Amino acid sequence: MAEAAGEESYIHPMDQFLIKPLFGDGPVGFLTITNSTLWMFIAVGCVAALTIFGTSSRALVPTRMQSVAEMMYGLVRKMVEEVAGHGAMAYFPYIFTLFSFILFTNLLGMIPTSFTPTTHIAVTATLALAVFVTVTVIGFWKHGTRFLSLFWPAQAPLALRPVLAVIEVISYFVRPVSHSIRLGANIMAGHAVLKVFAGLFAMVLAGGLGPVAILPLGAMVAMTALEVLVAVIQAYVFAILTCVYLHDALHLH
Amino acid sequence: MAGDDDQRLRDLDARITAAQAARAPDRPAGGGKFAGAELAWRMVIDLLSGVGVGGGMGYGLDSLFGTIPIFLILFMLLGLAAGVLVMMRTAAEHQRRLTAAGAADPGEAKQADPARE
């Protein structure tokens, strides 16, 4: 009886995504400080520490910290210049903020027993909606109602235009959805798989098949390496897609 | 004196740029093998969320007019089309980037040019 209950409790791949209030046991409300909030603040703190303290000496020959900060800056700057194009530099701070925040929440989530806010669609959807609203407002602000020509395929045959316009509108609204699902699902799936392998490892050990446990352990090591890669790539993809959307809003087709 | 320092800094900058260019990897940055998987994932998610968004819009219109399931079906199909559209654009953009990366190598760029329409 006890053993059966124990065996069942090895694998809880989704438990790591539970939102828990940090202070007290009350219900999670709008302003409750939860583990998610904590790790977001830690991520913001790390970004601030890296960019403020790392570059505070303003050394000509950078220290290691300053070098990392400069590389991050250079990466995002190059991306904004190349992808978002001319006149997008004004929005560089926003894209850099997004990139560094997502990068650090993802990477901090790789620390065992930590929490990854970006596994929650609520967090990624908020980020994606912020991008969506910002880009739409920029489009209308720069081009006025001419921005709507983005949805009007002028070179298509007249009879087809309304249908194509509806498709264009839908594809515009697909952006925030896919933008948020891509990040959230990637990170969440990776973390869940890691937990499954960890549970498998414990089950094999408890089942008395000692040496076989090397298989799930090896898989975990490989998955961890892959997850670090995914953490960085997803932050990069989120930022680069923001640049693509920004480019569309700044320079209409 | 200050002008002299400026000159030295500019020289250093030029030398660093030259050294970086010499050491830059031949292939375009983007993660090698994994970049392809990333692109594929992007397309799949775009396609699926196209259907999802279309279906959601259709369902909304249906519950507004009480005509279920006409708009639901119609907008799901339109959403699929939108998903394909987004996918094609992603592919076109990828092609464009490959072409831009291959511009350093004239033969490759010429090969990729017709696909750009």
Image (cartoon, rainbow, N blue to C red):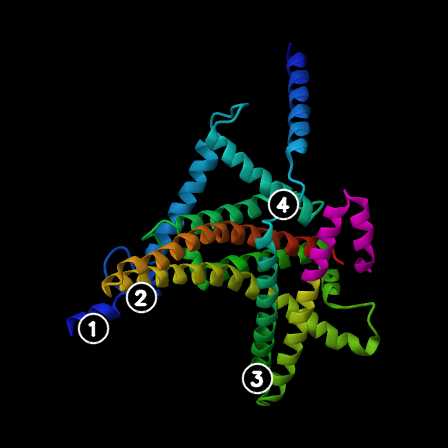
Is the stretch drawn in magenta largely helix, strand or loop? Answer: helix
Marks 1 and 2, the one that precedes in the sequence: 1
Provide the residue designation for mark 4: B29
Q: Is residue A156 magenta?
A: no
Camera-nearest residue between B116 and B78: B116
The residue depicted at 50 percent of the width and 49 percent of the height is A232
Name which residue type carries label 3: Leu
Q: Residue A168 location, x and y as percent?
A: 69, 69
A19 above or below B82?
A: above
Q: Earlier in the sequence, mark 3 or mark 4?
A: 4
- Kindly identify which residue carries mark 2: A12
Distance between the Cα atoms at labels 1 and 4? 51 Å
A101 relative position to A140: left or right: left
Alpha carbon separation for disc pair 3 and 4: 49 Å
Q: Which residue carries the number 3 mark?
A: B64
- Secondary structure type for disc 3: helix
Image location of residue B106, percent across then percent down: 81, 45
> Are the residues tagged 1 and 4 within 8 Å (C-beta)?
no
Read off the residue under disc 1. A4
Letter of the chain that mark 2 sits on in the rendering: A
